[in-house]
Image (cartoon, rainbow, N blue to C red):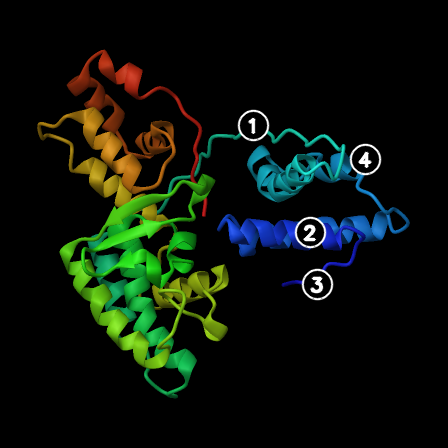
Amino acid sequence: MTKFKSFLTPLIHAFIKYRKASEHWNEDSYEVNLLLFDRYCSSNYSQETELTQEMVDNWCEKRDTENNNSCRSRIYVVVSFVRYLRERNQTNVVEPQLPKKEQRTYIPHAFSEDELKKFFRECDNLPLHPATYEVLSRRISVPVFFRLLYSTGIRTNEARILKTKDVDLENGILDIRYSKGHNQHYIVLHDSMLILMRQYDAAIKQLCPNRTYFFPAKNNSFHNRSWVQTNFRKIWDSVNSSHATAYQLRHHYALSNINRWIDTGFDFHDKLLYLSKSMGHTTLESTKYYYSIVPSLSQILSEKTAEGFDLIVPGVDDDESE
């Protein structure tokens, strides 16, 4: 655990312990932002011994350089920390209100079949030497990790922290315990992906026989966010000239499924619900975001579903993030 310095250190440690025990802790995001808040309190309120409203309000105030979404990401863990203390009667500070989410306007990369073939071919040909743990583990893990993102639409953080106990290799089911909004859900693997996962499991056991995480890092931990970003960027850039990110494989999964509905008879609401559940969305509104980035799809679906479309697909804020 990162070293905290302010008078809040004992309370922060207890908070983190509680969140980890309930499997509601994102080390890459929460710990970093909580550490920044701790440093802020240490530097500006070094003589204080209790948390005050001024500390929290000043820290959580939206900055000129932030939009609503970036401010939410920065202060969310602090708001949760204050809520945790209030529930235990350890502070009278009122938790700040999170800024309203803003709809995203960016359009994710549209992967071509040729780009994906080149990318996965390169994943399958990673170097074998020098035969260190890192090199061998990367060669075994990377091709399976990115194919899992591609074939299931799983979030990158969900794949990183996926535990072996939550992977049913007999029936091909993933139990996603930690997700955005802590929404536990299940994913059924395609038969071809299940075969690959079984082969991977047998191979990685030779390197890490008692691992906790399905894709293990050193010290029986999970890979951090930079591991995903660095590996994807290095492999993608070696074979493709376009810009793409690993998280956009999730977008590709959603769009590929939606596009299959065009020009075919279907029960729209049922298919939308199945897709929403498989992607771990808490509401249909999160899934409907993808309609804004599929050219002409809204018009096509409107024609097919008539008045019901307006009830099912209203305007909606984006609810996607890693």
Amino acid under disc 1: Lys
- In what quadrant of the picture does the N terminus appear? bottom right
Q: Earlier in the sequence, mark 2 or mark 3?
A: 3
Q: Earlier in the sequence, mark 1 or mark 4?
A: 4
For disc 1, the neighbor class at 10 Å (few under 14, some 14 to 19, many from 20) is few
Q: Is residue 134 left or right of residue 12?
A: left
Q: Earlier in the sequence, mark 1 or mark 3?
A: 3
Secondary structure, mark 2, is helix
Spatial CA distance of label 1 from label 2 is: 26 Å
What x and y, as percent, mark residue 235?
36, 67
Q: Which residue is located at x 41 percent, y 82 percent? A: 133
Amino acid under disc 3: Lys
Q: Earlier in the sequence, mark 3 or mark 4?
A: 3
Question: Which residue matches tag 2?
Answer: 12
Q: Is residue 280 visible?
A: yes
Q: Evaluate if marks 1 and 4 touch, with contact meaning CB atoms under 8 Å apart.
A: no
Determine which of the numbered discs, if any, sits on residue 100 in the image. Answer: 1
For disc 3, the neighbor class at 10 Å (few under 14, some 14 to 19, many from 20) is few
Q: Quadrant of residue 306?
A: top left
Q: Earlier in the sequence, mark 1 or mark 2?
A: 2
Considering every residue shown, the one lying at the far right of the view is: 47
